[in-house]
Image: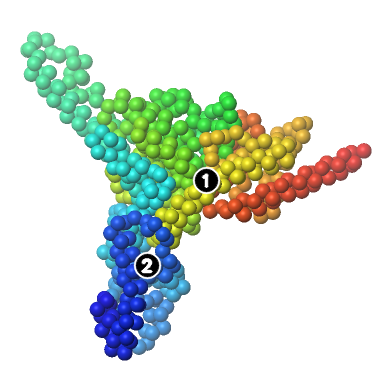
Amino acid sequence: MDASDITTLFASLQIPNNHTSVGLSNLLASNSSTKSLFHHKRLPDVGWTDLQIQRLLFELSVLDTNCEETVKCQNSTSNTGKFTHRWTGAGEREGRIYSPLVSQRHYGLGHGIGRSGDVMEAQPKAVGSSALLRLTLRLTLDAVRRGAGLNGNVGKGDQKSGPAAYGTLLPVCTGMSMALVLSGLRDRARKLDATAASEDLKMSNLTMDLAIQSTPPKKDPPTSSFVSALSGDSINTPVERDIVLWSRIDQKSCYKAILSAGLKCIVLPTKAHPDTDEVSTDLYALREALDQYGNRILAVLTTTSCFCPRVPDEIDHVAKLIQTWNEGKGSGAGICHVVNHAYGLQCHKTNKLLNRACTVGRVDAIICSTDKNFLVPVGGALIMSPNSKVIESISKNYPGRASASPMIDLFITLLSMGLDGYKGILDERKRLTSLFQQKMERAASVFGERVLNCPRNTISFGMTLDNLATASDDDGSQNKEITKFGSMLFTRCISGTRVVPRGESKTISGHTFVGFGSSHERYPHVYMTAACVVGMGESEMNEFFIRLEKSWKDYCAKRDKERKKKLMASF
């Protein structure tokens, strides 16, 4: 009903017009907010109320077909013999939902998103779901541009586009999204390389024709080398790009994602910084690998969000190196650069690094987790790129339709936050970072340890645990002691910390990582890490350090008691 209908109909119920006008003002204000949202496609400055969000979701749900009633309700009324709904579905997938509770959880949006050819493509039977997906993407890109500070400009002329110029949303976690991104880049590379080879062959044939026309007739036949050169035998056919160079970071999902895409992973070693405790990119190893594997390389995979002592890869230098290498190799797809920016959106310093990388060199795709950055349930990822064609290839690489659940969660959360709310959680994390480090340093002094000096990582913080075992203990005994301390932290309701022994090895899909956990083969310390991330409050942070100190004291007391008992038993 529009405003005029409401006025007339309410008057027929003897409701005074001045009363109706008050209610209409609320309705018009709500409609105005919705129109503004669709018109500007930007986050509202102030977050919406739950009632506003629910109203919009139900309005979008009404636009989808077959959402009037659940299967359970239909079955319970089927004995009447009359079907009362507007749509009848005779296909194999009609968005039917049995449970009213499930339907309520999804606001009746049962068709999912995308189509078999493209995860971002609109569905004829689900225009409401399609609109929700497109609007969620626009709101998310707006959040990372105006909130997190990523450059969203679309380049013109020689100007390069920013990292948030284009994007797509995938309903899978970071690891699976990485596999889909690599698969999409591989398909695109095959087409570009084939086109370049075809153009090279055309040019070669043209050159051969011109050479034959300009060559004076001779009695002797042309030499075999001359014929070979003119026939185009020297033109190289496209090489299958099946290798990904991965700057080592000890997270299993990254390595598995590369293998899941059907690609070979070359693990590049990291280097320990001589003046700090940081572990970072080995650019020399990257240069060597580029020269060694050449055109077989599909992409270089770098990381910006990681556990201490690992710090963000020097993605600006990597981007410049890849661009320079590609320029020297002629036409074709070239080597791509994929950045795992999983939870890096919450760090302003890392976002500036990403902006710079897109300015000075080549960046093809940036992968961000929705749960870690926007505080929604696990299950979604934002993919960004300075290149619209890359985003198109990735979106079209997704097989089949996709679940709308992660997008509904993200849509609700972004509207609930508003731009002010999103900036607020980023500012609060930034404020707590310095306090977190101070409290970590205080705890380290109490324990007789020290905080790892890793200034380029402002999310994850580390503290040595070298005193947990005596100097006479071998690595095996020390690692066992370290593992016990990590278990104690968890049993005391401390989650998220990582306790990393020294020199441990772990084999993943046939590859052995020495010194697993520290992203370096010979890291000199045993240590623990803890992170200061969005969503953590000051009271939670304070309680964490209280429990940490208590756990340390309890552990040391228990350890000393056990050692004393062993000593007494030896006499």
Residue beneath the point at 15% across and 26% down: 205
**Which residue is nearer to you in this view: 227 or 493?**
493
Compared with 337, 330 (above or below) is above
Question: Where's the N terminus, which quadrant?
Answer: bottom left
Q: Amino acid at mark 2?
A: Leu
In the foreground, 536 or 327: 536
> What is the residue that sits farthest to the front in this orientation?
18
Q: Secondary structure at mark 2?
A: helix
Q: Nearer the viewer, residue 363 or 206?
A: 363
**Amino acid type, residue under disc 1 in the picture:** Lys
Q: Which residue is label 2 attached to?
A: 57
Percent position (x, y) of residue 55? 37, 70
Residue 516: x, y in percent?
59, 37
Farthest residue, direction top = 219
Residue 149 versus residue 316 in the image, above or below: below
Q: Is residue 75 visible?
A: yes
**Viewed as shown, does residue 48 lie left or right of 330?**
right
> What x and y, as percent, mark residue 128?
31, 65
- What residue is at 30 percent from the left and 83 percent from the top? 17
For the rendered model, the colour scheme is rainbow
**Which element is circle 1 on?**
helix
Mark 1 Cα-neighbour bin, 10 Å: few <14, some 14–19, many ≥20: some
The circle drawn on residue 430 is 1
- The answer to which quarter of the image holds residue 235 is top left
Left or right: 120 in relation to 476: left
In space, the residues marked 2 and 1 are separated at their CA atoms by 33 Å
Q: Quadrant of residue 421?
A: bottom left
Q: Earlier in the sequence, mark 2 or mark 1?
A: 2
